[in-house]
Amino acid sequence: MSSTSEQYDAKKFPLCAPWDGQRGKSYQETFIPNMKSSWGLRGDDFANKQEHLTGNVPGGIPITTPAQRLANNLAVNARVAHEGTANDIRKSAVQFKNRDASIIAELRNHIPSQPWRDRIDMIKRLSVEGDYEGGAPLILVVIALNVAGFANGTLLYPVGHPNDGQALSARDMDNYQKCGNSLARHIIRIIGEEASPDPKAGITKMLAEGRWSGIKMSHVSIDGSTPRNLATLIKKLAFEHGANEQQQRIKFLSVLVSPPEIAAKAVAELQRCSTHLEKANGEPDFEKLVAEVQELWDLSITRGNLKLTTKVAGASYELRPLHTYRVRATPVVVSSLSKTAVCFLTAVCFLRCECLRGRGVSRPRDPSHRWGARCSSHGCPAVFRGSQQVPQRRTDALFSRLSRPDEPAKSVRLAHAASTRAEA
């Protein structure tokens, strides 16, 4: 059963759809985020399970942030102290262990694949037995204090480990910075590493490069939150591509191609970062940029410069700036063979667009004639008879004026004047 399937037994899998055990990205990108969301609603008097996985709970070791690693690649957060009376401290310590065990049990229950369940059971057994040679995760370390050959605060392997008394390797240090003293966090990490493609593999890097270079604005729904959703997509792909914040900012600005006012803002920011969009150290701030573009987007919608219209009920949205709206009518017939009627019909069809007033204007129809109006490839109305298209160049100025929402009242008079000139 796929982790993305909606057809599953909610009684058997109460938190979310189960993971089918297939290698790929579904574990990290779908299953674990769904589980974490559900764990946020489950907990005890001291913390919920989602908070438990961050380590920022009494008894836990918070995840080392990227900023901390940048300042010191050996940085490890201290354990969060239990608070309250002696009895409260004992309860808090017990609840920490219970939450950890509960998370492991619920994770196992939502993975029907027996081989993966066996793998979880093996990691638990190795951890209980302290079998580091067999692959037990490192959830206990020694902090050096006045130890010859090591600076105070250096993390050392514990007693019973094959490397007892030595400093942690780069790999073990990285795992401990991510997972700390929580066996549940280590199991989630281990299963994720074994179930996902190797991020260092050549094919993985090649695919990540292709997804990063191919990002487009159309990859997210065009709605009221398009800028933020686009930024979220870029951050997600940047993680697997290895792009830093400035590369994410440049990618974000480069794909903002519509509407014109926001595209112009993007070009200006690519040329020179605005002072108010910089960090304290003078570096461009991606988060501030996204917030400002979102505000401009909201303002454009509020002022009516942008209109979001659904293509099909329940589908995504299509961005249509008012001044670039096109006639959407299919070819229709008119009640006269004259070009005057055709031009008049074209103006009426144009008025029917929601970009002006949204008013419905009836259109004359007569199946006995073959004249009609339709959109040309560049969006301007054209006249045709049968399969032959007749260009109406003199009406270009008319439809340029009709595209202005402040002049709908003049449209019919302008249509008659233009059609008379076309008839001549």
Image: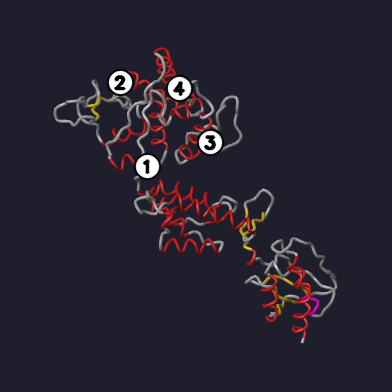
Q: Which label's residue is closer to the chain start, 3 or 2?
A: 3
Looking at the image, is 254 positioned above or below residue 223?
A: below
Q: In which quarter of the image is residue 4?
A: top right
User: Residue 350's x, y, as percent?
Assistant: 73, 68
Residue shown at the point (75%, 68%) measured from the top left: 349
Residue bearing mark 2? 130
Which marked residue is nearer to the observer: mark 1 or mark 2?
2
Residue shown at the point (46%, 60%) measured from the top left: 254
Work out whether residue 115 can be spotted. no
Looking at the image, is 113 positioned above or below residue 242?
A: above
Numbered range of the magenta stretch: 339-343
Q: In this view, does 353 lie to the left or right of 68?
A: right
User: Residue 181's x, y, as percent?
Assistant: 35, 26
User: Residue 265's x, y, as percent?
Assistant: 49, 62
Q: Residue 99 carries which label?
A: 4
Residues at badges 2 and 4 in contact (C-beta under 8 Å)?
no
Type of amino acid at the residue the image marks with label 1: Asp
